[in-house]
Image (cartoon, rainbow, N blue to C red):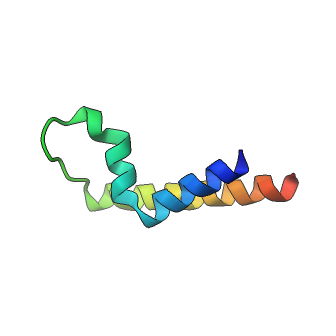
Amino acid sequence: MWILLLILGVIFTVFPKVSWYISNFWKFQDSAQPSSTSLIIYRIGGIVWIIIGIVLYIKK
């Protein structure tokens, strides 16, 4: 479980645009682009997932 959280956290942090497309591709017909605020939120979320993954690994 912790490894999955770390992997997702790294993907969300390093590639927020890819994460946005994976999460939202079904909502838009054409080539919609994420806002800069949305990308920042995905990066922050990725950092949170990384922290949770590390905590779960340490508690293991």
- Residue 44 visible to an observer of this rendering: no
The x and y percentages for residue 35 are: 25, 56
- Residue 46 visible to an observer of this rendering: yes
Left or right, 34 with reference to 19: left
What residue do we see at 39% from left, 62% from top?
Answer: 40
The x and y percentages for residue 36 are: 28, 62
Q: Nearer the viewer, residue 47 or 18?
A: 18
**Residue 22 appears in which quarter of the rendering?**
top left
What residue do we see at 32% from left, 59% from top?
Answer: 37
Left or right, 59 with reference to 18: right
The x and y percentages for residue 53 are: 69, 55
Q: Quadrant of the N terminus?
A: top right
**Residue 18 appears in which quarter of the rendering?**
bottom left
What residue do we see at 48% from left, 63% from top?
Answer: 13
What residue do we see at 15% from left, 35% from top?
Answer: 29
Q: Nearer the viewer, residue 9 or 36?
A: 9
The x and y percentages for residue 30 are: 12, 41
